[in-house]
Amino acid sequence: MTTHASLTVNLNDRSYPIIIGSGLLGGGYDLAATIHGPDCLVVSNTTVAPLYLDKLKANLGDKQVGSIELPDGEAHKTIVTLQTILDRLAESGAGRDTTVIALGGGVVGDIAGFAAACYMRGVAFIQVPTTLLAQVDSSVGGKTGVNHPRGKNLVGAFHQPKAVLIDTGTLATLPERELKAGLAEVIKHGAICDIEFFAWLEEHMQALLQKDPAALAHAIQRSCEIKAAVVAEDEHEAGRRAILNFGHTFGHAIERCEGYGAWLHGEAVAAGMIMAARLSGIKDADVERLRALIAQAGLPTAPPSISPGAWMEAMGMDKKVQQGKLRFVLLRELGDAHVGTAYESERLQQIVGARS
């Protein structure tokens, strides 16, 4: 068996493993053992399926395996695409013991997980993320859903996977732009609650950009450890889990205003983190340290040109809004985040009134 690391997301009877290693899709991990029914549906897309679907199928033992390939891209993360998965499940006679397997990036994982949450009021699903962003963030924690013209991920459900299988070997085929987008979420984890990890990223960013296996393995494992701990503490985002959305209120607004897919999610979050750090009112030196690391990763450090009115309208649909008040993930300092409304309205107006 291929050497791998294993973490656990502790949610009592719904706890599940995160398995991290290289070569796992080729039989390095017995994925079939986590599937308790006789059949499964693999949801992938037209980019990932030709690369990895056959390897995954070979790792599913004697299970009856169906598959569906979605069009690639954030623009297709819609209710219409969700319907195609539900139609396929129904037409194939899938039962409540069917398992849905998401093979792909964050879009595939979110929409396949939501289909699993909806079909027959919930069937099992497994995450097999193939992008860095999905491996370090979206595959863990049970957030599933689709976009709506009024906002990102407005339609969805919490539905935890049975397992997350991270084959780091899939990053070999990941385009450079997608790799950098994933690094935004890695940086986020250090910025919100682990300053030592943030410092490690400052020292090892070039190795990560060059896809050094040891550096990537450490970054993925530490990111998953951070996210698993936060999710175990607050599964449904009633409190602390919201810190994982650092930079996302601004980032989601960028995605909506520019059109889903024009900016990759990680690119929008990168610019959004700098805006959120400025809004926090932390030391200029800390804001610059964050900006420098984001720039070192080759990510945007400034948002696109968006009118103040469009900013406020888009952010008004954010899921952290309570009683009409925008709540943001703010930094007390680098490595220490919280959620709240303790920001200066004038500072927010200044940030959205001109390019950062």
Image (cartoon, helix red, strand yellow):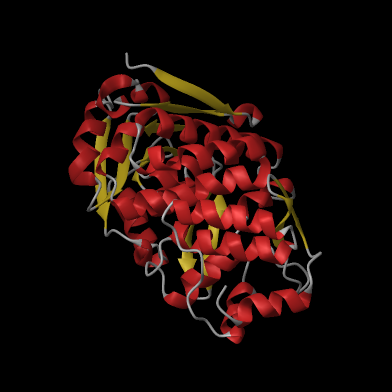
Q: Which residue is drawn at 32% across and 13% down?
A: 1
How far from the left and from the top, in percent, is residue 298?
A: 41, 55
Image check: 337 left or right of 259? right
Front in this rendered view, residue 179 or 224: 179
Q: Which residue lies furthest to the top in this view?
A: 1
**Residue 272 rendering spot, x and y as whole percentages:** 57, 64
Percent across and percent down for residue 200 are 54, 36
Q: Is residue 22 left or right of residue 13?
A: left
Q: In this view, does 51 lie to the left or right of 120?
A: left
Percent x, y of residue 271 = 53, 64
Q: In which quarter of the image is residue 325?
A: bottom right
For residue 251, above or below residue 90: below
Q: Tell me what residue is drawn at x 50 percent, y 38 percent.
A: 203
Give the quarter of the figure containing the C terminus. Answer: bottom right
Up/down of 67 relative to 62, above or below: below
263 or 351, which lies in front?
351
The residue sitting at 74% across, 58% down in the picture is: 282
Q: How many numbered circles does the render carry?
A: 0
- Can you see residue 162? no
Asked whether residue 106 appears in the rendered view, the answer is yes
Residue drawn at x 51%, y 59% is: 270
The quarter of the displayed image where residue 78 is located: bottom left
Point out the residue furthest to the front here.
285
Which of the pair 265/27 is nearer the observer? 265
138 above or below 26?
A: below
Instruction: Give whichever of 300, 5 is nearer the camera.
Output: 300
